[in-house]
Image: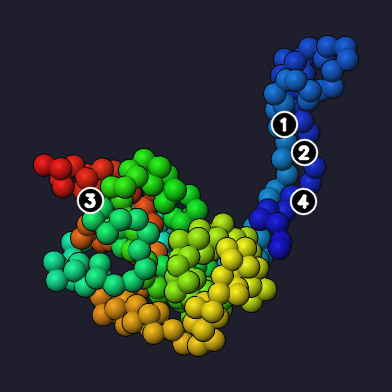
Amino acid sequence: MAHFWEVSHHMVVRSPRQVRGEQPQPGFSAGCCNRPFIEEVSAVTQPPRSSLRDVILTGLMVIAVSCAVVVTYSVWQARNRGVTGDATIEVSRRRWSQLTARGQRIGKADAAVQVVEFTDFECPFCKQFHADYWPQLVSKYGANLSLRVHHYPLPAHPHAYSAARAVECAGAAGKFEEMFVALGQAEGALNDSVLAALQASIGVAEDHRFVDCWATTTNSSIEADRRLATDIGLTGTPTLIINGTRLRGLPSYVVIDSIVATKLAEVRQ
């Protein structure tokens, strides 16, 4: 890139002492520690037209890229993080009954606060909820809280459907929660070898109920959850619905804790 300005002659730099006719102090150069004065600058020439055009085009490209980054981040934040206020909507009683009538459950059926989650086990925000938020909520609210899990494996995550099958089949063997926790704590991709190791670690690999379920590559429960997700207009994971209040994206733990506390207080009134 060409320089903005081209100087055709040299410039003389003098210190304030030299301008006043004083000698510089020993050990200091003319421009050191004293603000220099520019005594003479030769004629300055304008850059060539081609260079100016390149500068303008580069500036426009930088602006366009910056705008694209801002828009992309805003969309990502709205879809994946969530906030309170207009990011929560109420579902109908009929829909809420439909959501809580089926699917695997962690916790008591008559818990005062019931959380329904549509999840993808390879979604990083789902993993954050499973491994971080949910244990804190259970520790705080105990038997007052339950989680109903529905599956919504996204096409972008190659192992999400297999992970959903693994947890459903573990449920058939009576160990849904154990596999749910193991998947939340697993590191890296949930490929076949990782899933096999998790199956062995919770003791279902040789259980005939698990083996029979695992032999079927298409799981009817997962497919039913997918249809339900489409029916209610889901666009991403996780989607949390707490006693009928649907959250968009994953808010902070503080926000979720506040909603749970509010719902619990409403039930106790």
- Where disc 4 sits, the SS reads loop
Quadrant location of the N terminus in the rendered image: bottom right
Task: Calculate the distance from the C-alpha at mark 1 to the C-alpha at mark 2.
Answer: 7 Å
SS class, disc 2:
loop
Of labels 1 and 4, earlier in sequence is: 4
Q: Gap in Å between the C-alphas at discs 4 and 2?
A: 10 Å
Q: Residue 161: where, in percent of width, then height? A: 50, 78
Q: Which residue is mark 2?
A: 11
Quadrant where the C terminus lies? top left
Disc 4 marks a residue whose amino acid type is Ser
The one nearer the camera, 25 or 215, is: 215
CB-based contact (under 8 Å), mark 4 and mark 3:
no
Name the mark on residue 39: 1
Residue 185 drawn at (x, y percent): 56, 57
Say which label, 4 or 3, has the lower sequence index.
4
Q: Which residue is mark 3?
A: 112
Q: Is residue 49 left or right of residue 123?
A: right
The correct choice, above or below, for 109 with respect to 43 in the image is below
